Amino acid sequence: MARPIMVMGTMSNSGKSLLVTALCRIFHQDGYRVAPFKSQNMALNSYVTWDGGEMGRAQVAQAEACGRQPDVRMNPILLKPTSDVGSQVILRGKVEGTYRARDYFAKKKDYIPLIRECYDELASDCDIMVIEGAGSPAEINLKQDDIVNMGMARLVDAPVLLVGDIDPGGVFAQLYGTVALLEKEEQARIKGLIINKFRGDKSLLDPGITMLEERLGIPVLGTVPYLTVDIDDEDSMSGFLLQKQHHKQIDLAVLRFPRISNFTDFSPLEQHRMLGVRFVESVQELGEPDMILLPGTKNTLGDLQWMKETGLFEAVRGFAARGGAVFGICGGFQMLGEELSDPEGVESAPGTAAQGLGLLPMRTVFAKEKTRTRKQMTLQQGPCKGCYVDGYEIHMGVSRDGSGNSLIECSKDNVYGSYLHGFFDEAAPVEALAAYLAKGKGLPEPTEHLVSHRAYKEAQYDLLADALRAHLDMDRIYEIIGIKA
């Protein structure tokens, strides 16, 4: 069986996922068979594996860093929020149901055999398992029947690295307070502390580090600088989602829905020197971009209503009527049609129907069965016509044209939509979109050729590993795992 190492954080967005990705890449580079694992993940950014399972995108990036195919066993429980108090529960890649938070917490301990089964199956074919926690292990109101932090560490007897985020301030209090709130047995599992996202002169931290080590008896294994590597982020606090401006020739405005999902579909566009992506939440922020992009959403009808309430619904319709280019993916694609209906109550009260933007000649009917499939195709419509796409579908419902034909893409004049996530992971669609928008704006046609987003990510994983090797005591980490470096 593989030797485990677990990364926990003092809070959400402390950098756990990035550090796990870095460790996965380092161990892979050093010749070890390694796999990531997160027993329970809450995210709206998900991915479809080759066998049709659904998993969180953070574990997808971590698997890629390990040189492995993404596998739903790496994320046996995925929670996709559908409201402020409820989530769709996905077990080993398949939807089990939708639960209110209280009901899910009452069931958590029932999932321990599933977690153990997935972990053991992966560990039987690995040298090292890199496990990621969630939130903070010191959330004492949630510790009963914990399955993702110290409960997971106890289940597989994993040593723990605790990460604190210095960027918002108070990192020493974060680290000390987290450890202080743990039980003695849990404190003993923490073998090293890491300070993350540091900017400035590291020597200024030395007195605090010395005092922290003396008070806790736990070594600080490194101070990691604020990194500029470009790794896909599934978190709602992602810096990419916070982009409100850009400084490029072509302005791409993405609507930031309240329940936006798979926003990383648009991150490959940033690789092009002419394309600038920004996220907008109001008519005032929208302005007059060169293209409006409607992303995926976990609640299409709810976010469509949000568009109507904010004025963005009419703003997008007016923009398209003036000849502006509009592009939607998945839920955003569904919104572009004439009508959306929910006879079975998948997203709303049974029998609910809503007017769509009316920009594409199609209607969508929601159904309880979720479509989860990989799809390779040559695009037949829109500004990227003729380009090859290797993507995947994750959606509830079917969209049909006036003749009753099921659609995976549709276009009319300056409006285009598709169900395919990963639409821009190949270089050709990015280049084609840039050329289309440049021509419409009277700019010279771009001539450079991009590498695929997959090749770009591989280079980023190597840069990430190089940065972490320079700032972490990897010899000590190997010692903690029980492997001679």
Image (cartoon, rainbow, N blue to C red):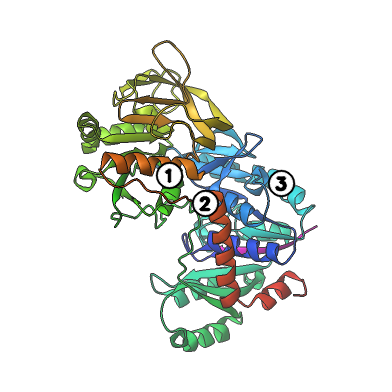
Q: Quadrant of residue 169?
A: bottom left
Q: Is residue 4 magenta?
A: yes
The residue segment tinted magenta is 1-8
Q: Nearer the viewer, mark 1 or mark 3?
A: 1
Q: Are marks 1 and 2 in contact (CB under 8 Å)?
A: no
Image position, residue 294 (x, y; %): 35, 37
Does residue 193 show up? yes
Name which residue type carries label 3.
Cys
Residue 118 marker? 3
Q: Is residue 171 left or right of residue 275?
A: right
Name the element at disc 3. Answer: helix
Check disc 2 and report the residue beneath it. 451
Residue 466: x %, y % from top left: 58, 70
The C terminus - image quarter: bottom right
**Mark 1 or mark 3: which comes first in sequence?**
3
- Identify the secondary structure beneath mark 2: loop
